[in-house]
Amino acid sequence: MRAVIVAAAVAFIVSLFVTPVAIRVFSALKAGQPIRALGLASNEGKKGTPAMGGVVFILATLVAYVAGHVALITLPERQIAQEKPTMTALVLLGLFVSCGAVGFVDDLLKVRKRNSDGVSARGKLLGQAVIGIGFGIAALSVASTGGQTVISENVSFIRDIGWLDVGKVGAVIAFVFVITAMSNGVNLTDGLDGLATGASTLVLGAYALIGYWQYRHWCADEMYARANEYCYQTRDPLEIAMIAAAAAGACVGFLWWNTSPARIFMGDVGALGLGALIGGLAVATRTTLLSILIGGLFFIITITWVIQIVSYRTTGRRVFRMVPLHHHFELAGWSEVNIVVRFWTVAGVCVAAGLGLFYSDFLAATG
């Protein structure tokens, strides 16, 4: 637990104190966020606010991960089985950085063109797919000494569903879908000050708890497995907990400056990176389908966006005033702060329900 706490604390401190530096640097470079003229109250006064703040919390997470491994050196021998960086860390952090890089290119093009047209939607999807395929193959091909791979050939809910074996190709396809869907879900949510940052913090915190719980009840821990029939067949759960906690801590530090009125936006570099990391955490912890509930706010915002697009293209009618969903409530007269707080509440309820299901499965199996 010490390493997880150290990682979260270091990430928080780095993000909290580096973000104002980034604000000054991006402001000096005139890397302001282009704002579309949509007639929304939340857009007033935001033109020129520096974007690409996601670079800060990605960097903070990487620094914190190293700090967490330094902390592992001081732990008892039985607890340092994961002292060295693992394939799990390579996949999760690789997704975070690589999808963040796709977002960075998008943000950079927006700044250079001085409009909101960056990388095309098709281009971003292609980049996410290539990244997902590369890391999916690596995650499925390199096994630990215990024979576990980062992702499984089975679809998972709270653990692998034994009868839902999709094979290696199916597993990589499912991995790409989860990464792409979650990445774009967080990106759609990133529309109001602090909304995506706060919601992501809650989801990442949940995965830090899940990862650490799996570590304490890990099948690879011979002392635990000999005494208990119920254990988790995941790979490197302590790494998962450390990375999730570090990212959550980094988001909290960033939120200090990103909450209303935001002095910096995370940009696509932050949103695409965070979504990819959350998707990777879901697959690595064998909670792929449960992530729909844990990341319930992202799911709601994505599905309402799909409903709007399908309805408009098939019938010419809009179901909502505007999508993503938070803009619908803006046009209904809700203030930006009210929307953000209420959406955070929805995200928190979804996270609590997901954790409740996860824990109830453990109680049912051990009770």
Image (cartoon, helix red, strand yellow):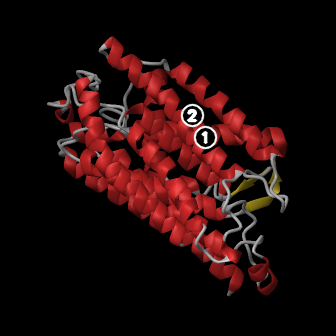
Tell me: 173 left or right of 13: right
| Residue designated by label 2 | 98
* Whether residue 287 is situated above or below residue 352 in the rendered picture: above
Residue 326: % across, % down: 31, 41
- Estimate the x, y position of residue 359 in percent, counting from the top left: 58, 74
Provide residue 292's location: percent of width, then percent of height: 55, 52
Residue 107, by quadrant, is: top left
Name the one closer to the observer, 100 or 182: 100
Q: Nearest the camera: 47 or 122?
A: 47
Q: Amino acid at mark 2?
A: Ser
Secondary structure beneath label 2: helix
The residue lying at 76 percent from left, 43 percent from top is 171
Quadrant position of the N terminus in the picture: bottom right
Q: Does 47 sit left or right of 26 as displayed? A: left
Q: Residue at x 58, y 72 (%)?
A: 74
Residue at label 1?
Answer: 94
The CA distance from mark 1 to mark 2 is 6 Å
**Image quadrant in which you'd find residue 43:** top left
Residue 267 occupies quadrant? top left
Question: Is 27 or 285 nearer to us in this picture?
Answer: 27
Residue 153's x, y, as percent?
80, 49
Amino acid at the residue labelled 1: Gly
For the point 26% across and 36% down, which residue is it? 23
Q: Are marks 1 and 2 in contact (CB under 8 Å)?
A: yes
Q: Is residue 147 left or right of residue 341?
A: right
